[in-house]
Image (cartoon, helix red, strand yellow):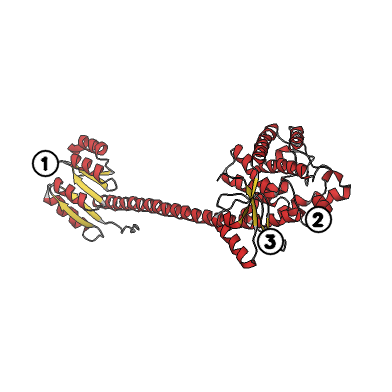
Amino acid sequence: MKLSEPEYNTHIVVVDDEQSILRSIERLLIDTEFELHCFTDAREALAFCQDNTVALVLSDVRMPGMDGIEFMTLLANDQEMTERVLLTGFSDIESTVGAINKGRISYYVDKPWDDERLLRIISKGVQNTNVRIRNAYLESLTKEQNAALTEWNETLEAKVASRTEKLRASYLSATQTLSALVDKRLSATEINNARIADLVTNIGRHLSLDENGVQDLGIAALLCQVGKMSFNDHLLQGAQLSFNHEELSLFHKHPCYCEAALVFAPPLAGVASILKQHKEVLDGSGYPEGLDGTQIELGALILGLVTRYAESVNGQYFERQLTHSEARDHLLSLAETQYPADLVDITCQVLDEWQKQQLAAPENCLAIRKLAPGMTLTRDIVAPNGVLVLARDKQLDQHLIDNLQQLESSLNVELEAYVSAFED
């Protein structure tokens, strides 16, 4: 509910059991802006103050029934903002001191009083009360506005997060398609980009990376070959250790090309950083910038290790293709000098588990109509004209299966899919 700005309060309550005192104060304030409420009974005055906002209360000390000290004490507990002024006689000094302590009196005025002094005290007291009311209003308004701003920020953050996630999802979909096309250019390899993505995300989760970090790793893996697409076939598919100096100089620029490809995709800034650094190593012998261990982020080191393994098995690093065991031993030889030893150990564990799964999971060839959600492709599905339809390692869902069946119908052909072996 929106707070209403308070009006300037001019209500004054005067309490005295002598009518002559009340009339004197009425005459004093007759030409002022103050609205006067006079009482001879302190209980009636207290009830009025409890039902209305009063700027100032002026009360005698000695009254029958409830005296001024009790009245002011109850008022102080119930109406903290109201200014309290005591009318005292010479014989009331001791009582006045008690009232100042218990009733938190702001001023006391001796009888008989000086009109100008009393008028100044009343005016100052009314002003003080209104300042307190105004400050309380501003404090409440600030809290209300801060609460509204917090709620708005939370709503905005949720909207931004939702839109960012949708944008990342669309980038991921486009990335998967691009990665499949890159794989097609690389021809048949033992380990493709999708497999690299599975391995690095698995390692990331073993290391307890947050989900955004794991997702960035996966996207980076899918795009890690994009920077090589302008290379000729020799640079693209040849063994790096066979390249001459000029060829290596050009080849070592591919991480920069990867980063440049994502410059206009702000949600993938983390991915671009991983791609830029994924060929850097601890001892500074990596490329493109020769960073040392303190400058390389963990995601880049993970992707660098897995791509080194993939390149070794695919025959893109050494002059022959290495077996799993040979490639694994090669990674172990890089521990501590080029990669953290604990990271190498975890990576080898993940690679060993993956190799066991590969050996234990032969493939089946099925007609498209026999595919089921959850199956994973072990080979690319290619149209009769050679166009890549779906890349291997893609897990099928009903939407993809429906699209494949529709494609068969429109092309008037029967496609086949190789999937991981499964139990009937």
* Nearer-N-terminus badge (3/1): 1
Q: CA distance from mark 1 to mark 2?
A: 103 Å
- What kind of element bears circle 2? loop
- Say which mark, if any, is on residue 231: 2
Residue denoted by label 1: 65
From this view, report whether residue 351 is shown above or below residue 25.
Answer: above
Quadrant occupied by the N terminus: bottom left
Q: Which mark is residue 383?
A: 3
- Indicate the secondary structure of the residue bearing disc 1: loop
- Residue 416 sits in quarter: bottom right
Q: Is residue 86 left or right of residue 152?
A: left
**Residue type at the position of mark 2:** Phe
Query: Who is closer to the viewer here, 276 or 303?
Result: 303
Please tell me which residue is depicted at 77% across the width and 51% down the height of the picture.
254
Q: Residues within 10 Å of mark 2 (few under 14, many from 20)?
A: few
- x%, y% of residue 82? 27, 48
Q: Is residue 337 left or right of residue 168?
A: right
Q: For the point 67% across and 54% down, which residue is it?
A: 391
Q: Please tell me which of labels 3 and 2 falls first in the chain.
A: 2
Residue 169 in view in this figure: yes
Where residue 190 appears, x then y in whole percent? 73, 46
C-beta proximity under 8 Å, tags 3 and 2: no
Q: CA distance from mark 3 to mark 1?
A: 104 Å
Amino acid type shown at disc 3:
Ala
Amino acid on which disc 1 is placed: Gly
